[in-house]
Image (cartoon, helix red, strand yellow):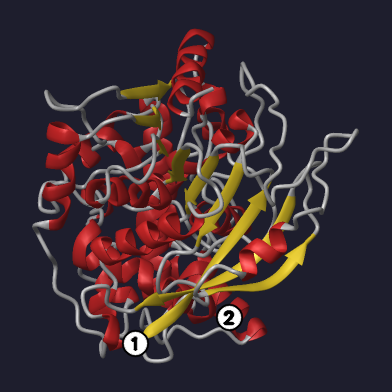
């Protein structure tokens, strides 16, 4: 099937929540390595400085050290020289942006795969908090600043990204020789699974949040069936009514959209026009609503009596109109390229909008990628990942919200999968966390991660 991610305007945060779990890793004394000694207040001393150790790693550049929000941590922004093509290292390199939250050499290390840009703020993921560990955040290749001066988009593949992550682990194992756990949310969760597919022994376990598994890009039935059954019939009808009202008032809506664009200097060269961008946003609104809002938000869906201001404001809040204009759309070209070449994308239901639509398949990723960038879909990539999970995957935790359309087609375990579970957060959307699980399931998941980490 084909599906959409929830990532819109801001850089991806890789599910970097700061939620308290049912248990925390026990404190461990620091060793005499460069990790330093632990002071009376629990912080790490600068004796045997981590900064010196980082500067000694080949191909790694320390860009800056920033204040860390959590006591006992140090936070670094780094750059790692990576091959553009891991199969042909002579084809050139680019600098991949990384972040490091350093606690101590003897703590477990969490590899946080973002799938997008890496946040340059020191936020710990759930596994990092649970393990009281170090955390390495990895910006996905060709996102943000992690791209060569001239981009050959054919090298933006799940395999090349997995090789990036493999090199990160190989390099930092020189400093952090204990256990490793990988994690990521949404597209970052997908990337963490893809990394395991090609390098299953790199880490000791993986926690993937809200990660779609689009095995068959031509079969949208699971996705459409989900949107036809999620929530209550009255809420689904309200969303359809809002879509119709928006399109019936297209002239007023697009005029407001154009006025906003003019006031900010935004253009629509990539998508084509404000009118097409508006129609795309309307079509995506129901899926975006269920991905990002609780069921209680059904009460806020505007009805047929709503004013133009109310309808426009609701659409902007729900589908984020800014994302379809060039200033933001340019940042997400690599995302839509991946959707249209390997990951798959989602269709939408349009029967209730008959006679109101103007554009053929405006949600196709091709509409968000400039025409001078060639795109060809690789139908082998996702079935290969799915087959590995079901036949050889191990130590995988999938955390999915029951209200999340992105995981209407989730990863599934098979006869060859070992020491793995799919965990469902009841009534939770695309922002599912371990903290949203039932107390019993959360305790079991916590114990599993601690066991994987040797704690």
Q: Earlier in the sequence, mark 2 or mark 1?
A: 1
Q: Is residue 182 left or right of residue 265?
A: left
Compute the Cα span from label 2 to label 1. Answer: 38 Å
Label 1: few (<14), some or many (≥20) within 10 Å? few
Disc on res. 139: none
- Establish if 238 lies above or below 130: below
- The residue drawn where x is 38% and y is 27% is 402
Residue 310 % position (x, y): 61, 53
Question: Where's residue 147, x and y in %?
Answer: 43, 80
Please, is residue 60 above or below residue 293 in the view? Answer: below
Residue at image mark 2: 261
Q: Nearer the viewer, residue 223 or 92?
A: 92
**Can residue 126 be seen from the camera position used here?**
yes
- Farthest residue toward the top? 440
Q: Nearer the viewer, mark 2 or mark 1?
A: 1
Task: From the viewer's perspective, tell me whether residue 263 is left or right of residue 424.
Answer: right
Q: Position of residue 68 (x, y in %)?
A: 77, 52
In the picture, residue 52 is in which quadrant?
A: bottom right
Q: Which residue is mark 1?
A: 92
């Amino acid at each position: 099937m084909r599906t959409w991610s929830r990532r819109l305007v801001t850089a991806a945060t890789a599910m970097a929540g700061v939620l308290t779990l049912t248990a925390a890793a026990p404190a461990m004394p620091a060793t005499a390595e460069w990790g330093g000694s632990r002071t009376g207040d629990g912080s790490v001393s600068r004796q045997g400085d981590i900064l010196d150790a980082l500067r000694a790693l080949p191909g790694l550049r320390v860009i800056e050290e920033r204040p860390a929000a959590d006591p006992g941590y140090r936070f670094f922004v780094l750059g790692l020289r990576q091959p553009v093509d891991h199969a042909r290292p002579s084809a050139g390199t680019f600098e991949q942006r990384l972040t490091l939250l350093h606690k101590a050499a003897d703590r477990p290390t969490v590899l946080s795969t973002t799938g997008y840009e890496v946040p340059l703020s020191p936020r710990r993921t759930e596994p990092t908090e649970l393990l009281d560990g170090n955390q390495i955040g990895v910006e996905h290749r060709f996102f943000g600043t992690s791209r060569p001066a001239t981009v050959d988009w054919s090298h933006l593949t799940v395999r090349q990204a997995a090789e990036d992550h493999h090199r990160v682990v190989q390099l930092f194992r020189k400093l952090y020789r204990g256990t490793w756990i990988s994690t990521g949310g949404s597209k970052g969760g997908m990337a963490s699974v893809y990394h395991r597919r090609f390098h299953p022994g790199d880490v000791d376990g993986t926690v993937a949040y809200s990660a779609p598994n689009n095995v068959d890009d031509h079969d949208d039935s699971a996705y459409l069936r989900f949107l036809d059954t999620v929530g209550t019939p009255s809420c689904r009808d309200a969303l359809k009514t809002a879509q119709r009202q928006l399109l019936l008032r297209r002239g007023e809506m697009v005029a407001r959209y154009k006025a906003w664009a003019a006031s900010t200097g935004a253009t629509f060269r990539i998508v084509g026009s404000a009118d097409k961008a508006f129609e795309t946003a309307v079509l995506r609104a129901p899926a975006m609503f269920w991905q990002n809002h609780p069921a209680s938000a059904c009460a806020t869906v505007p009805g047929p009596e709503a004013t133009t201001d109310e309808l426009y404001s609701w659409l902007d809040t729900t589908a984020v109109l800014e994302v379809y204009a060039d200033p933001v759309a340019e940042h997400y070209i690599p995302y839509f390229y991946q959707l249209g070449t390997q990951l798959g994308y989602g269709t939408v239901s349009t029967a209730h909008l008959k006679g109101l639509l103007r554009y053929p398949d405006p949600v196709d990723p091709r509409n968000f990628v400039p025409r001078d960038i060639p795109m060809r879909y690789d139908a082998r990539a996702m079935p290969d990942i799915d087959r590995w999970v079901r036949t050889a995957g191990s130590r995988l935790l999938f955390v999915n919200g029951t209200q999340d359309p992105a995981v209407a087609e989730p990863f599934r375990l098979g006869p060859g999968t070992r020491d793995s579970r799919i965990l469902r957060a009841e009534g939770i959307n695309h922002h599912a966390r371990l903290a949203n699980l039932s107390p019993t399931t959360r305790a079991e998941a916590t114990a599993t991660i601690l066991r994987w980490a040797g704690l």
